[in-house]
Amino acid sequence: MSLTKFPNFIMLKYEPHKHSFFAYKDVAGTVSGAVVVESEIGAFNPMAKIEIDPSKTNSKYFHIRFSHNNKYWSRNNAEDGFIVAVSTKAEEDTIQSSMHPSGFNVEINGAPLSVVVSKESTEFNRLNFVDWESIVKLPKHIALKSNNEKFLKAVKDSYSSLEFMSDDPNAVTSEQEIQWLPSGEIRIKSKAYEKFWQRGTDSHQTVYAVSNEQDTNKADTLFWPIKVDEKTIALRCVGNNKYCSRNRFYYDYLHAAADSIVNEAKFEVHELVSERSVYDMDYHLSEARIYDEVPYLSGSTVLKNAGDEPATLTGTLGYQVESSYSFTSSWSLTAGLKVKFSGSLAEAVKAEVEISGSVTKTWEWGAVESTKNKLETSASATVPARSSVKVNYMATKGKYSVPFSYTQRDVDSTTGKATITQHHDGIYQGLNCYNFRFEVEKAVPL
């Protein structure tokens, strides 16, 4: 397969284990940082997200990097042949034995299932990939609003029907609970009925809340979410490959009969959280990555010597520095929910990422805070007689990403109850300038 056919972000899976994806894991009894596939590594596990990174020196090759911890795949050594993910730097030298691909196949071997290099092509070499962008991770407790400006609610009839007739997302009848499956599909439970959605067999293809906890293999109880925008989704029923929609011709019931994502098939997601705060952020600095570094001219000044002798001159140099940062997570939708962040900030300094300050701010996951500051410094240079020199204040401008763990406190909008949970899916992304230095250009006669 040519490189151009790969999405930027993928997940790799081994066909016999259809619902298990490759991830980085230190496994007792095997090599450190081995790339493995295990049953608990499903589509919603951030450790399974992979970035396809084209080689900068040879268009035939590409690097494979785990996005969350910034570790590149490479060959461990010639003896054991294990594929590991231990380096945050890409190896462009194809002569190096750790370069991947290296003209060999990869193979699944052992228990846990690890990736090793093999000289022969076999059934164990065949891997499939999933486009990461096709996986939509919804919040656990939500309400869904249709284009009639009404929320989906439990009707409480003998059929356990669902209809878009509620004005209150926080009503018990409006609450839906998401169950994530390793495949990337979801099941949806009506909290009023305490039953999962299931496509019916009637002519309208009506969706009822009648399925039990154990019915995880019934296709009519499985749905595939599609992201429309930051607040809106569509839901495709796996059982008939049709989209769920509001049946405007039949009491606004939910049914699974639309051939495409029509307006009635677009559902606005309301997460049932009235207040969210994120704190105790723990940055994994050893897994930080600095990339896309470019020279940056922050400012310059001209020093003029009108005298007959060389002279060391000093002048004021104005310059501008740029920076930005954002906090992201594995959730696919922001759903308009504001989050109070309290914790440290990081920045790139020379070849490393360091903790640089702190912030307390309320905004959405993924929002970018950008600044441009104008500053002054003193520039000195020895200038020949009757000449001028231009002094440039150069820097390196680079991007960086750092995985982090955090504590999250949510207040349920339906009950007012607070819950505190630990998460390990945070990515801090930033841009700033560093390695400032003066560069003096060749003197020019006055």
Image (tube, grey):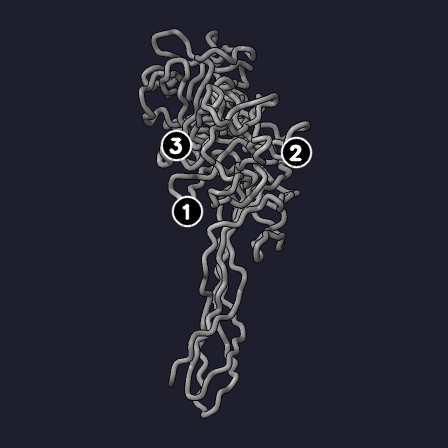
Check disc 2: other Cα within 10 Å, few if <14, some if 14-19, many if 20+.
Answer: few
Disc 3 marks which residue?
228
Viewer-nearest of discs 1 and 2: 1
Disc 2 marks which residue?
420
In this view, 305 is above or below 354 = below
Disc 1 marks which residue?
57
Where residue 258 sits in the image (x, y, percent)? 33, 19
Residue found at x 50% / y 77%: 316
Query: What is the quadrant of the N terminus in the image?
Result: top left
In the image, taking residue 251 as reference, residue 47 lies left or right, namely right
Most foreground residue, 423 or 279? 423
Check disc 3: other Cα within 10 Å, few if <14, some if 14-19, many if 20+.
Answer: some
N-term mark: 2 or 3? 3
Q: Secondary structure at mark 3?
A: loop
- Cβ atoms under marks 3 and 1 closer than 8 Å: no
Q: Amino acid at mark 1?
A: Thr
Where residue 289 sits in the image (x, y, percent)? 54, 47
In the image, taking residue 404 as reference, residue 257 lies left or right, namely left
Q: Secondary structure at mark 2?
A: strand
Q: Classify residue 267 by image quadrant.
A: top left
